[in-house]
Amino acid sequence: MGRRRQPEIRQRLLEALTDHVLDHGVPDRLQPLADAAGTSPRMLLYHFGTQQELLRAVLRQARLRQREDWGNLLRARAGEDYRTTLARAWTGITGSSGQRYLAVFDRLREDPAQQLWPGFRREATTDWFAPLEEGLAALGRPELATLVLAVIRGLVMDLTTTGDRSRVDAAFEDFLGSLPTGPTRG
């Protein structure tokens, strides 16, 4: 009779593997992940099944972290103009903590077959609408969520492609200036 799986060990491994992938990217082999988790590739496969299943679990965990982190950045705050919130969110998204997510998930965006995460590109877009709509409602314009998201995504792509931070940051600042002013939540 085989050993019973221990979900707490799997979760501990998943956290360590996710930390490693966010810090170093998605490796092509299991050994760097095993080393990061202090175990063997064989034990990783025992807990996750296949290399593909392991990578899917790690990417989903990283995505949960990103949604929490960026959701907090985009969340409307009482008494704060949402344009100020968006400026702070931009700094967080494009700063070092945000770049780790961008680096990992860019690989998925570029994968035409979407083998690791079918439907990722759609999900990576649509799950930001709710916090943006809520925040933009404070400006009286929740319907601008699509526009704001498109600008953020486009400027992030520009930044990751060119590395021209000052130009891209200035463009985002100009964009924020074009948004309407509105009542703040009190």
Image: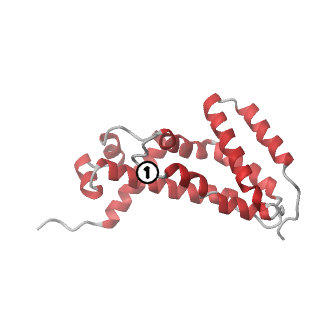
Decide which of 114, 131 is in the foreground and name it. Answer: 114
Q: Quadrant of the C terminus?
A: bottom right
The answer to whether one can see residue 82 in this image is yes
The amino acid type found where label 1 is placed reads Trp
Decide which of 181, 8 is in the foreground and name it. Answer: 181
State left or right for residue 153 relative to residue 144: left
Q: Quadrant of the N terminus?
A: bottom left
Residue at x 54% of width, y 46% of height: 101
Category of crowding for the residue at label 1, using alpha-carbon neighbours closer than 10 angstroms: few (below 14), some (14–19), many (at least 20): some
Residue that label 1 marks = 117
The image quarter containing residue 170 is top right
State left or right for residue 164 relative to residue 82: left
Residue at x 49% of width, y 43% of height: 104
Task: Point out residue 35 in the picture as x, y percentages from the top left corner.
Answer: 32, 43
Secondary structure at badge 1 equals loop
Q: Is residue 77 above or below residue 101?
A: below
Task: Point out residue 177 in the picture as x, y percentages from the top left corner.
Answer: 86, 46
Task: Point out residue 47 in the picture as x, y percentages from the top left corner.
Answer: 28, 58
